[in-house]
Amino acid sequence: MADSPAKTSGLTEGQSGALDLAYKAARAYRETLPQAPARPVLDIDAAVARFSAPLAEAGLPEEEVIENLVTAADGGLHKMSAPTFFGYVLGGSHPVGVAADFLVSAWGQNAGSSFETPAITGMERAVRDWVIDLLSLPADSGAGIVTGGSVANMAGIMAARHALLAAQDWDVEEQGLFGAPDVPVLIGADAHSAPFAGLRYAGFGAGRAVRVATDGEGRIDAEAFEKALAACTAPPLVILQAGQINTGAFDPFADLIPLVRARGGWVHVDGAFGLWVAAVPELAHRLAGVEQADSWAVDLHKWLNAPFDAGMVIARDRAPLVASMSARGSYLPGLTAHWEPSDSTPELSRRARGVPSYAILRHLGRSGLRDMVKRHCELAQRIADALAEEPGVQVLNTIHSNQVIVACGQGNQKDTQTLRVLKRVQERGNVYPTHGEWDGQQIIRISVIGYAMQDEDADRVVAEIIDAWRWCQQSTP
């Protein structure tokens, strides 16, 4: 049974013991990551069976709960924080961010109000300013710290919706979309699913967006874009991409954005991971012109390696973002002269998710972040160069950032062989790349983004893929 609250320390013996056990288990998990299998060994049915017993009438002591939780989760966790995880463009939850996240949970702050949580707002405002500066975006931009790229894209699209309709004398926050003027939407044919979801959430619909043709790297074709833009009957919302999910490529911002500005449109950039390349001076030219956009979405739990979940929506003009996001009740603190966290996000209640990012940025500094992003781009090139030397293995993209896509084999067996190689690599559990589709074919997608990844990790994923490919050639399906 739960203990009675202690009146002197604020914690009972059981509560204190539970905190100690959780810390020890977390530390043990992180210490064994490099040696642990890269994939779960527990399947979903077995995992559900472990946790799905009927809820007992009587509760368990705190320490027993934590012990049971750790034991039952064993084998069912993906080693996403390890330098062996090359899937899904996921950061590795940097340990200093994890440590700060412990404090976030212990502090128990609802971080929606600067009046209620001034220390949290101070840290999150610093994160806002630092990220905007690191990415060379307009210094007076507004921003909101959200759960990740999906919500950041949604918020940016909703800010665009407000601004573009207001320019046509329509208050969408008051009048809704029924009977509203038209807002054309242009987006690249190879855009990520997140902005398409944002279009749905904003009521624009994903299917009515004009999908503009792209080149062999997934970048919007300038000639096709000009034709699509010329056909717009009103100032459009244009969604560009910094970091194509397969190739890592960047749309030609410097060519496209001035065309949209001349039409009075709004440019939103999905830069979940790719915007971080702007923090590296010798690579920033790859995103030339991206700072001319009107809004940007960026993940903090990708290249910054913040613990889940954390992202940012950034808007050149903060007013449309606030108009589309804020929701105020009479019981809430009044407006202040300060940046209010909840005014730039779709949440009133949320955890202090910016604190881990504050800790990581203070730890890395400008040079640490810059060196990490640069190192990952160099490791991606190292992987591509090594795989390209293996007969029968094709690297399908130019290395623009941290993404490498690979296919194995030839002819009509290519997709089958590629998937067999990937399955073999994943089952061996030494590294974990993931699946994708590109240009009508099956691929192995390698994302180099974990904070701890070094040369030896890049060489390991190369060796595993080559070994699996040679095995595939010598065995029958």
Image (cartoon, grey):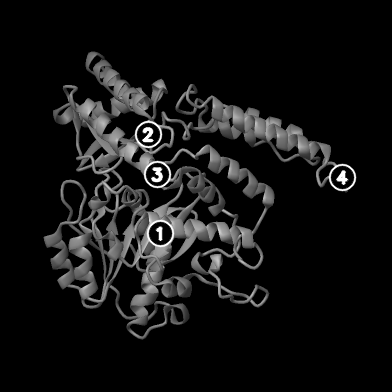
Q: Position of residue 346 (x, y in %)?
A: 51, 65
Q: What's the CA distance linking mark 1 and mark 3?
A: 16 Å
Mark with earlier residue (1, 3): 1
Residue at the left extreme, as displayed = 223
Q: Is residue 373 left or right of residue 100?
A: left
Q: Is residue 439 left or right of residue 59?
A: left
* Foreground disc of the pair 1, 2: 1
Residue drawn at 32 percent across, 49 percent down: 274
Residue drawn at 39 percent across, 59 percent down: 153
Circles 4 and 3, Cβ within 8 Å, touching? The answer is no
Q: Helix, strand, or loop for circle 3?
A: helix
Q: Which mark is residue 58?
A: none
Residue drawn at 40 percent across, 44 percent down: 367
Q: Nearer the viewer, residue 445 or 355?
A: 355
Mark with earlier residue (4, 2): 4
The reply to whether residue 328 is visible in this rendering is: yes
- The answer to whether 209 is drawn above or below residue 308 in the figure is below
Residue behind mark 3 = 367
**Could you tell me the amino acid type at mark 4?**
Ser
How many numbered discs?
Answer: 4
Residue behind mark 2 = 86
Residue behind mark 4 = 4
* Foreground disc of the pair 1, 3: 3
Q: Which mark is residue 132?
A: 1
Q: Helix, strand, or loop for circle 1?
A: helix
Q: Position of residue 358 (x, y in %)?
A: 52, 51
Mark with earlier residue (3, 2): 2
Q: What's the CA distance linking mark 1 and mark 4?
A: 47 Å
* Foreground disc of the pair 4, 3: 3
* Foreground disc of the pair 1, 4: 1
Mark with earlier residue (1, 2): 2
Q: Nearer the viewer, residue 228 or 446?
A: 446
